[in-house]
Image (cartoon, helix red, strand yellow):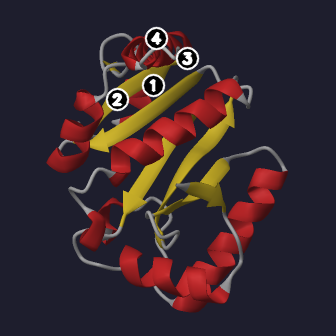
Amino acid sequence: MLKKRELNGHECHVLFELMTHPDVFPFVRQKAYSFEEFMFMTKQTIEAEERGELISRTILDEWENPIGTISLFDIKDQAGFLGTWIGKPYHGKGFNSLAKEAFFQEVFFEKDIATIFMRIRQINIRSRKAAEKLPYTVRANDTRPLIFQQLNKDEYIYDLYEIPKDLFTMNYMRQVSEQAELQPLEA
């Protein structure tokens, strides 16, 4: 479902084509206007991860084809901002929630992250609905006023959401417990 980003020509070409779709491109944080620029940005992303500045993964479909990316940017004080995009042909097929679940498990349980923030444009209804469906997501416009104000210096563009590690962990443990209860007992 997820793998570390690679400077692989075929993979980068597929991701670049998916990213430049007009329904996807406006909502991508790291925009590239040419394939060469995309390759350069991918190289920079890999190097930034090596320095501990971000965490970035390629999202794969069930056949391990690249379909998008998920990243935690601006890591500071055990917190960072989530950036996710998935190619248009894969919208509405459940890949977003699967990728987020796997990514959150990695950053909360294997990395030193305590909080994930999501800034979502008010006009991005698809992303807002997806964020609000997650049982561990909290709208943080009022509870994190300094961050909210920094995101909206000139005008109200972004809503702020927060995923605290403890809330994600509690939800994850509940899911594991419920799955264990559903397993038949072996004789």
Q: Of discs 2 and 3, which sits in the foreground?
A: 3
Q: Of discs 3 and 1, which sits in the foreground?
A: 3
Question: Which label's residue is closer to the chain start, 2 or 3?
Answer: 2
Horizontal side, residue 109 vs residue 140: left or right: right
The answer to whether marks 2 and 1 mark residues whose Cβ atoms lie closer than 8 Å is yes
**For residue 177, which numbered disc appears in the image?**
4
Question: Which label's residue is closer to the chain start, 4 or 1?
Answer: 1
Q: In the rendering, at what x and y percent does residue 134 appear?
A: 31, 28
Can you identify the residue that label 1 sits on?
147
Quadrant of the rendered structure where residue 75 is? top right
Quadrant of the rendered structure where residue 103 is? top right
Tell me the CA gap for discs 2 and 1: 8 Å
Is any atom of residue 172 visible in this view?
A: yes
Can you identify the residue that label 2 sits on?
160
Q: Of discs 2 and 1, which sits in the foreground?
A: 2
Amino acid type of the residue tagged 1 in the rendering: Ile
Question: Which label's residue is closer to the chain start, 3 or 1?
Answer: 1
Tell me the CA gap for discs 2 and 3: 16 Å
